[in-house]
Every structure is written in structure tokens, then in C-alpha cells.
Image: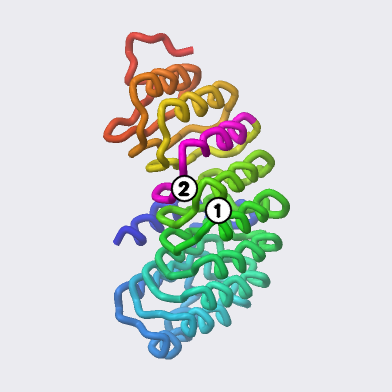
Amino acid sequence: MAARARADSERRSLQSPSGKALNNFVPVCLAARGYTDGVLQENLEKEILNTGCTELDLSENLITQRGASILAKVIRLNKTLTHLSLVNNRIESNGAKALANALNTNKVLILLDLWNNEVKDEGVKALATTLATNKTLTHLYLGKNEVTDTGAKALADALKNQNNTLTHLYLRKNKITKAGAEELAKALETNRSLRELYLFGNLLENEVTHAFGNALRRNITLLVLDLAGSGINNDGAQALARALEKNRCLTILDLADNNIEDDGVDSLIDAIMSRVRKIIMTGYPLTPSCFRDHDLP
């Protein structure tokens, strides 16, 4: 249900590569049907090829790398499918590699959701290689896939050097540490397409705030940064607050479930007052409207 709700939310704002709104939706929901690879193969032509399907939800089924390979063959030359959700299946690294290979020639897929598929670093590296040439994929969900610093670095390299299309990258609940997060932060210094980056539930440390602080001073496109549950303390909050004084685009900074106390909160409040933005703390979102006795600029 959460995956479908998220897809509905994304749908309202997505555009085609030409910049036109995607209004002619032909959704096909096959979520939680108990589909195996064999059943998928039997139904693929009827459910997708002959319907002009634009959105396909196959979340919470029993699809493995074989099923992903079957899908990849369809995606390679498909001209209608813009959204594909495989949440909570088991396509693993080889399945991700097959999909990545298909995206080398596919010209229409905008959103790929692989949450909780045991994709791991090898699968992520294949997708990162594809990002170097793919010019249509804007939303990539890779949460809960046991991604480590190796996968994070591969994605960072793509964002830093080649890709200028991806706008949303979801890496929540993986195994990325300080080193991988710092690579992603460095990519943000030069990347001009990414709008949202989600890192909640990884193995980050307070020191990542310095790398992201440097990135926020230089970045001119990122709107949402999720560093919830990252071990950030007052010093880290103050480092981010100083960066926000220079940044003119970030609108949401998620710092929930960290170790920020009064001094850190005070610094963040000052950053909020410098321009309209929202900082999420545990159980309490900080916005300029929280401080009625202050005059906003």
C-alpha cells in the first residue's frame, strides 16, 4: 500500500523527457498477487504489451532474477511504460543487472522502484553505469538493498561525472557509512540535476555533516536532504546551519532521530529565519511559523 501511495504522489508531478505532463495514464496493478516468474511470463503480453500500460506495479510478489530478466526484455524496446515498481520481491543483483542493461536502450521509463530486492552493490554498480548514458530515468528507489560504500561510490561517480537527469535518489535503510556518504556529498558539489536525496537508516556518523555542509555551500539544485538517524550532534547541526546561511535552494532538511540538543537547535533556528525552509526534528518540524515573535526577512 505504501508503494502504491508513493507512486500516486510521484505521478502528480512527473513529466516526460520532453517536459510535457504525463496525463494519459494506463496503470496496471498486479501487486500482492503471488506472481511467480512463470505466472509473470504468462501474463506479460496480455497485461502490458496489449494495453499500452504506462505504470506497472508488481510489488510484493515472488519475482526473482528470472522474472526481472523477462521484464527487461519487454522494457528494452517498450515505448509506453514510465513507472515500474518491484517493491518487496527478490530480483537480486543479476535481476538489477538485467534491468540496467535494458535501460541502456529504453527511452521512456522515468521511475524504477526496487525497494527491498537484495540488489546489493553489484546490482547498484550496474545501475550506476547505466545512469552514465540513460537520459530519461529521474526517480530511482534503492532502499533496503544492503548497499554499502561501494555502491554509494558508484552512484556518486555517475552523479558527479556523467548523469544530469536523475532528480530523486532513495537510499534509505542500507549499509552506507561515513565514507560512502562523503562520496555522495562530493557529487552534490557539482551535480545540477538531483533534487532529493534520502539517506535515513544507514550507518552514518556526525562527521558527514562537514561533507554535506561543503556540498550545500556549492549546490544550487538540491531541495530535500534526508539525514535522519545519522548520529548527528550539536556540532554537526551547527556545521549544517552555517552551510544553510550560504545555500539558497534547500527547502527541507530531515534531521529526525539524531542527538541534537538546545545549542544545535538554536543554530538551526537561526538558519531557518534566514530564509523560508523546513527542518524536521524528532517529533517536531521547525519552520519559520514556529517563531511568531521573530520578523521574517
The residue at which mark 1 appears reads as 15
- Residue 205 shown left or right of residue 152 in the figure: left
Which image quarter: residue 74?
bottom right
Figure check: 74 above or below 122:
below
Pick the front one: 8 or 146? 146
Category of crowding for the residue at label 2, using alpha-carbon neighbours closer than 10 angstroms: few (below 14), some (14–19), many (at least 20): many
Q: Confirm whether the magenta stretch covers residue 213.
A: yes
Q: Name which residue type carries label 2.
A: Tyr
Figure check: 112 above or below 167:
below
Q: Name which residue type carries label 1.
A: Gln
- Residue 191 shown left or right of residue 278 in the figure: right
- Residue 41 shown left or right of residue 167 in the figure: left
Which SS class for mark 1? Answer: loop
Figure check: 297 above or below 252:
above
Residue 88 picture location, percent across and down: 37, 69
Which image quarter: residue 56?
bottom left
Pick the front one: 83 or 143? 143
- Residue 297 shown left or right of residue 1 in the figure: right
Q: Is residue 26 visible?
A: no
| Rendered residue at 43%/80% (across/down) | 64
Please state the extent of the stretch shown in magenta in the rendering.
199-217
Question: Which part of the image, by quadrant, shows the N terminus?
Answer: bottom left
The residue at which mark 2 appears reads as 198
Q: Nearer the viewer, mark 1 or mark 2?
A: 2
| Rendered residue at 61%/32% (across/down) | 214
Q: Confirm whether the magenta stretch covers residue 120.
A: no
For marks 1 and 2, give the CA distance: 21 Å
